[in-house]
Amino acid sequence: MWVTLILDGLKQIWRNEGIRGFYSGLTPSLIGISHGAVQFMLYEEMKKWRIRQKRGRADPHLVTLPTSPLADFQNNTEWILASTLSKTMALMVTYPYQVIRSRLQAHDAKNTYTSARDVIKKTFKAERLHGFYKGYDFMDFVSHLLGSLCPYCEFYQEQ
């Protein structure tokens, strides 16, 4: 049953859109997976900065990995602040792609937009920078921040 549905869907994509139809939405998806990479990179850079500051070293290559998240932070507050800031900055950098992707996937997108570049141009022209953060509210922000602490807790509890 499900195999028939999948094959039917693949045939329809091939007939209506050709090979390009199978890659539709790939670029925004690739950008979307960068969120975690950006967050962890920022967190690691903040951690390295704190280690250098704490140890009084200016050389970024003299940093070793700690065995716990608090090993190179003064207290829980610094650790929570680093993870919160890294999550916040990652959200600010990568959230606009969510808006672009959702507008491309909207029911009438083919009548409104021709490409991701077209979405960016039209959104900026009509709504300015605010348009790229549309739909993101304070409760989303809080839930993302709370969720950002979990990976760090899990990672360091395993060691």
Image (cartoon, rainbow, N blue to C red):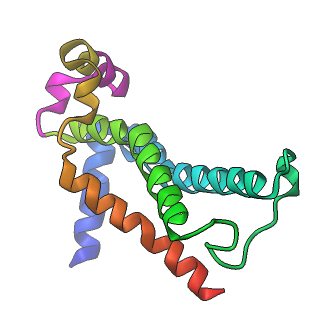
Q: Is residue 95 left or right of residue 153?
A: left
Which residue occupies 51% across, 80% down?
Answer: 154
The image shows residue 77 at horizontal and vertical percentages of 49, 65
Most extreme residue toward the left, as rendered?
108
Question: Does the magenta-highlighted stretch encompass residue 12?
Answer: no
Q: Which residues are magenta?
A: 107-121
Q: Quadrant of residue 144?
A: bottom left
Residue 119 is a magenta residue: yes
Question: Does the magenta stretch mainly form a helix, a strand or a loop?
Answer: helix
- Does residue 35 appear to the left or right of 101 in the view shown? right
Residue 132 in the image: above or below residue 7: above
Looking at the picture, tell me which residue is in the foreground, 8 or 128.
Answer: 128
x 50%, y 51%: residue: 86
Rendered-image quadrant of the C terminus: bottom right
Residue 114 in percent (x, y) is at 28, 22
Q: Indicate the quadrant where residue 75 lies.
A: bottom right
Which residue sits at x=49%, y=72%?
Answer: 151
Please determine whether, in this image, residue 114 is positioned above or below residue 125.
below
Viewer-nearest residue: 103 or 111: 103
Residue 58 in view (yes/no): yes
- The quadrant of the picture occupied by the N terminus is bottom left
90, above or below 78, in the image:
above
Which quarter of the figure has residue 94? top left
Q: Residue at horizontal 20%, vertical 19%?
A: 127
